[in-house]
Amino acid sequence: MLSIATIAIVAFIAAASLNLNAQARPADEARARKFIAEHEARVRPLEKAVNLAWWTANVSGKDEDFKTKEQAQNKLDEALADNERFAELKAVKALKLRDRLIARQIEVLYLTYLEKQVPAGLLRQLTSKANAIEQAFNVFRARVDNKELPDSEVRKVFKESKDSARRKAVWDASKAVGAVVERDLRELVGLRNEAARTLGFRDYHVMQLHLNEQTQEQVLKLFDQLDELTREPFRRAKADIDAKLAKHCGVTVDDLRPWHYHDPFFQEAPAVYDADLDVVYAGVDILKLCKDYYAGIGLPIDDVIARSDLYEKPGKSPHAFCTDIDREGDVRVLANVVPNEYWMNTMLHELGHAVYSSKNIPRAMPYVLRAEAHILTTEGVAMMFERPARSADWLQKMGVPVADPKGFNETGEKMLRNQLLIFSRWCQVMLRFEKELYANPNQDLNALWWDLVEKYQMMKRPEGRHAPDYASKIHIVVAPAYYHNYMMGQLFASQVHRTIARKVLKADPGTALYVGNTSVGEFMKKRVFAPGKTMPWNALTKFATGEELNAKAFAADFQGK
Ligand SMILES: [Zn+2]
């Protein structure tokens, strides 16, 4: 406790230092404003060019469009790598800026430029090493009995085969890419650590988190809490799944090994339930449903749909994404919609990104801050809006007939719960493995990988296996130190949903639906979208939900089940 006198002194010193700052302030703030204005003049057109080139290349798939995209990206990177500009930015950041909006813009810009300050030679080595590995992944095909298996065949075996030996052979074959890229991956890790050290960080993982305004301690604390809260619900869900998988293959639960699950990493929920949600969605106009739903909650997206590219065509990317081209409201979605449950989910998800964009972040917000607070908050919003696709109550409220609503709800609820639990345990493995990989790349990584898989995913390692199975996960190459953000997005989704249920709908969060309620859109605009990037992710979480990000709301979604 501070005494009254101490408080007075502290206040006095604070006032004095404010006064000192006040003297220097106009020139300092003018200098910061000048930097920001110059950044906007130089970089804003380059960012728009990158976004447009990215869009065009993914729609057409043409080589020349991909070349244009790469050139646009290089131009942007060059501008951000500029040494002199960075020196000025560093000097400006050291000033005591009192205008909150200006200080925040400088903070955000500093991290953006810092990432690009790796020496050019090292950066080239890094890019070429990562590209070489990515290419090795692209051309790799699993080979069984001297025959190449296309990806679709691998998936089919995992989903359907009742023959454990066949499953094992295909699993082994799918992991063989690990041995192909292991050496290059270890070199890449070394280069990444070297790059991090040139910028003053202990290792690459620490740096990546710092660039995203996170620390290892903070993220690990959250993941420890998540581990604690999901362990038993996961164990129960997995026991249920294991029993079904064992029965399907005619083995005991004790005999189950990684090849008995439906994907090579057990990151997805195996499809083991009876009701088929696709049957309902086969007759649904997914786009109309999306338009009606978002309009009903006061976040219309008709203009986004009109600008989007939504159906399959030759050369086009088979995936889905949403992009904000200019931070002036030109927001688009790329997708390949067909009427099934997967695309219902995906469209609700991508349009969730679309509403959390310059469409709903006020135009008065400075350009640098006119974007989502963090990758985890936009993923969280998208995930929150995606969840009701598994609910018959939601469909019926939207006017879609469901023949067996009880069966649909039971299956949908189980699918969602299993998917979230399984994904959360898998993210534990990824986060902890990557942290260790960069902290101590010379340890026995094969053993580390399987130790983590056994502990968090509760899956038995194959007897006597000594293979670089970690290296068969492409994300470690192409999206390093990133996976945990998806999980944190799920926590954000649960936390915001529970806040909406409590404060806006005054309803049970387990059954609360937003259909036709414009106050949901009002809440999202005011408490989640409007601040843009003015607050770091955890401050925004507190602003929106009253609490910092934590795993309680996520865990509550599984309580008693
Ligand atoms: Zn997303």
Image (cartoon, rainbow, N blue to C red):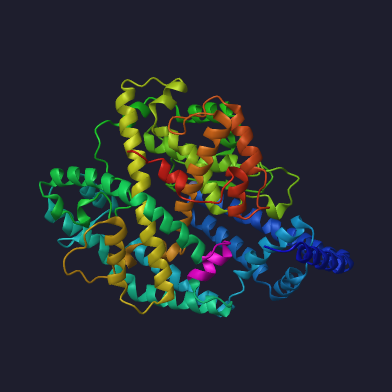
Q: Is residue 208 magenta?
A: yes
Query: Which of the pair 277/340 is nearer the observer?
Result: 277
- Regarding residue 473, the answer to whether it shows in the image is yes
Q: Where is residue 46? Give x, y as percent.
A: 67, 59
Instruction: From this view, report whether residue 399 is shown above or below residue 17.
Output: above
Where residue 213 sits, quadrant-wise, is bottom right
| Part of the protein shown in magenta | 205-215
State the predominant SS element of the stretch in magenta. Answer: helix
Left or right placement of residue 501 versus residue 21 in this view: left
Instruction: From this view, report whether residue 531 is shown above or below residue 431.
Output: above
Q: Where is residue 198? Give x, y as percent.
A: 57, 80
Q: Where is residue 366? Give x, y as percent.
A: 74, 51
Instruction: From this view, report whether residue 537 is shown above or below residue 118.
Output: above
Q: Residue at x 49, y 72 (%)?
A: 204
Q: Is residue 131 magenta?
A: no
Which quarter shows the C terminus? top left
Please count the marks in the image.
0
Q: Where is residue 466? Give x, y as percent.
A: 22, 72
Q: Residue at x 28, y 52 (%)?
A: 263
Left or right placement of residue 153 versus residue 358 in this view: left
Left or right placement of residue 443 versus residue 248 in this view: right
Left or right placement of residue 247 versus residue 513 in this view: left
Query: Which of the pair 342/198 is nearer the observer?
Result: 198
Instruction: From this view, report whether residue 400 is shown above or below residue 298.
Output: above
Which quarter shows the N terminus? bottom right
- Regarding residue 310, the answer to whether it shows in the image is no
Q: Residue at x 79, y 65 (%)?
A: 5
